[in-house]
Image: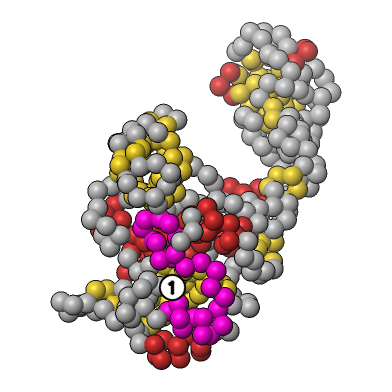
Amino acid sequence: MISVKQALEIINNQPLPLGFEEIPIHLAVGRILAVDVLADRDAPPFDRVTMDGVAIQAAHFKPGFAYQIAGTQAAGGVPQSIKDPSHCLEVMTGAMLPMGADCVIPYEQVTIRDGYATLQIDAVAPYLNIHRKGMDTIMGNTLIPKGSRLSAGKIGVMAAVGVSKATVACLPKVIVCSTGDELIPIEKEPLPHQIRNSNASMLQAALNHWGIRADSIHLPDEKSALSESLAKLKESYDIWMFSGAVSKGKFDYLPEVLQELGMNSLIHGVAQRPGKPFLFGAFDHSIVFGFPGNPASTLICFHTFFTPWLATQQGSAVDSMVAELDADIVFKKPLTYHLLVSIRHEGQRVIASPVANSGSGDLIHLGAADGFVSLPPDTDTFSKGQMFPLTRWSNVW
């Protein structure tokens, strides 16, 4: 077996060129940006009024003075000007500051009567209630760097600078292959010796975080049928993602079948719990991730190995996080221990509380966890208050 660190190095150095595509920006949430988005002009592009009120020349302010209202400047209207310092203009939020004016007094501090505005304040300052031109950014600045995961807010920025299509890294075509004759479709009623196929839906949901709409197939625990099914799929997908049949059981034919089909086996066995039998390999134009079939093993291996690999291929990275243990833990095996935890925040601290469970096959308590902390293999005692790497199920966001 190899260490988790060694496995990650092997996996992240296995490329799968997918190229780029342009898609409408409203469909790009969650995708990885492939080019920088630049400011096409200053922002704001003009001195912008931030409150409804009246605009005046600050240098000519007089407490209690009644300014003659010379007109109204609406948002989106052609800019007007104040030529006489005894005049003012009514202005609306979002309007360009009238020429000749340099501050805005909100209506709440103004009395308007018979075409005159009397200011109910004692002092003003230049550019009061004005969002200055170029205050947020200047033309040519990078607003969203390539490699960024696009959120709704970033989409808004792109729209504001005239980018209607996002250039993003292409997503791989993925098939989720679940194995095990004990598995039945989730809508069916299981017999006493059967269970519903939860892992396939779990993996498809995890992939959906990345915008990947994966296909799914259930494969039999029979070597010739398994080989025949996989041979038909060989040229159709970029990623083969398996759940089950990668260990050393009597019916775990998958590693042998994949190698017979031409897979170069790069990893089979990682010093970790759960997920020790993890399998990774490559065909000429596709990648194989083989996760052990117990639910916790499947999901933890997905986030430990597939998620950072995909981020690397997309030109991005998964945010690193740490959390503080909320209990003493003893684990006396020389393995990386992925400990299921629930998370709470206490100020700036992220606290990880172990989730009691009966092992990697315990799906109920897997659903109660927010993620896992990874405890290193070089010690067997981990103390409350120590900090360790945290992976949350939602880290991809």
Q: Is residue 233 visible?
A: no
Classify residue 6 by image quadrant: bottom right
Residue 265, given in percent of the width and then of the height, sits at 53, 73
Classify residue 238 by image quadrant: bottom right
Determine whether the residue tagged by mark 1 lies in a helix, strand or loop. Answer: strand
Color scheme of the displayed model: secondary structure
In the image: residue 43, left or right of residue 212: right
Check if residue 392 falls in the magenta segment: no
In the image: residue 78, left or right of residue 272: right
The front one of 175 and 270 is 270
Q: At 52% from the left edge and 52% from the top edge, which residue is drawn?
A: 5
Residue that numbered label 1 is attached to: 242
Q: At 80% from the left edge and 44% from the top edge, which residue is drawn?
A: 140
Query: Is residue 66 depicted above or below 136 in this figure?
Result: above
In the image: residue 228, left or right of residue 110: left
Please tell me how many numbered marks the rendered image carries: 1
Q: At 36% from the left edge and 58% from the top edge, which residue is drawn?
A: 274
The front one of 166 and 226 is 226
Residue 99, given in percent of the width and then of the height, sits at 81, 29
Q: Which residues are magenta?
A: 254-278
Q: At 63% from the left edge and 8% from the top edge, which residue is drawn?
A: 122
Q: Looking at numbered disc 1 in the image, what kind of residue is underneath it? A: Phe
Classify residue 48 by image quadrant: top right
Residue 112, given in percent of the width and then of the height, sits at 61, 21
Residue lying furthest left: 192
Residue 344, given in percent of the width and then of the height, sits at 35, 38
Query: Is residue 297 depicted above or below 231 in this figure?
Result: above
Query: Is residue 319 depicted above or below 105 in this figure?
Result: below
Q: Is residue 126 visible?
A: yes
Query: Is residue 23 depicted above or below 3 in this figure?
Result: below
